[in-house]
Image (cartoon, rainbow, N blue to C red):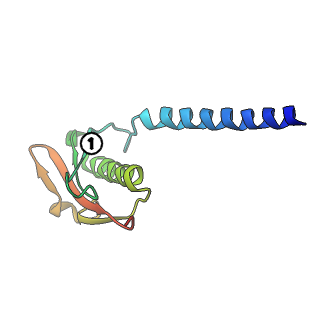
Amino acid sequence: MKLVGAVIILGVLAGCAAIQNGTRALSNDRQRFNGQLYSAKVQADATRPELFVVGVGNLDRGLEGAVEAGRYEAYTYCLNQFGLTDIRWALGPDAPRQSLRITDGRLTLQGECVGWV
C-alpha cells in the first residue's frame, strides 16, 4: 500500500512539473493582435511597482492591435507581479483614440495595478 501511495505522489508531482513547463512554454509565445506582432514593454516605477507605463511600437501595423497589445502587457504585468489584473488607468486603452499618447511612432499607456494591497 505504501508503494501505491508513493507512486501516486510521484505521478502528481510529475504532472505539476509538466503543467509548469507547459505554462512557461506558452508564456514565451508571442501574442498576435489583429494578426500582427507588436513590440510592447512595461516599465514599472522603481519605488512603487504597482505604477507602470507600457510602450508599444510597430504602430504602422495598426493602432487597434497596438492598443490591445498594450492592454495585454499591462494585464500580464499586474498578474505576474501581484496576482490580479485589476488596473486603474491614467491613460488607458479604452480612452478615445484621439486622446491616446503617441510619440515618435510609439503608443504609451499608463496605469496602476490595484487590489493587491
x and y percent of residue 20 in the render?
56, 37
x and y percent of residue 110 in the render?
22, 58
Report the amino acid beneath label 1: Ala
Element at label 1? strand
Residue with the most extreme left position: 104
Q: Which of these two is toward me, 48 or 37?
A: 48
Q: Which of these two is toward me, 1 or 23?
A: 1
x and y percent of residue 54 in the render?
23, 50
Residue 31: quadrant of the picture: top left
Looking at the image, residue 3 lies above or below residue 84: above
Q: In the visual, does 43 lie left or right of 6?
A: left
Q: Residues within 10 Å of mark 1 (few under 14, many from 20)?
A: many
Looking at the image, residue 40 lies above or below residue 22: below
Residue with the most extreme right position: 1
Q: In the visual, does 35 lie left or right of 9?
A: left
Q: In the visual, does 89 lie left or right of 3?
A: left
Residue occupied by mark 1: 40
Q: Residue at x 14, y 56 (%)?
A: 101
Tell me the quadrant of the picture where the C terminus can be found: bottom left
Residue with the most extreme front position: 2
Q: Count of labels shown?
A: 1
Tell me the quadrant of the picture where the N terminus can be found: top right
Residue 21: quadrant of the picture: top right
Q: Which of these two is toward me, 6 or 49?
A: 6
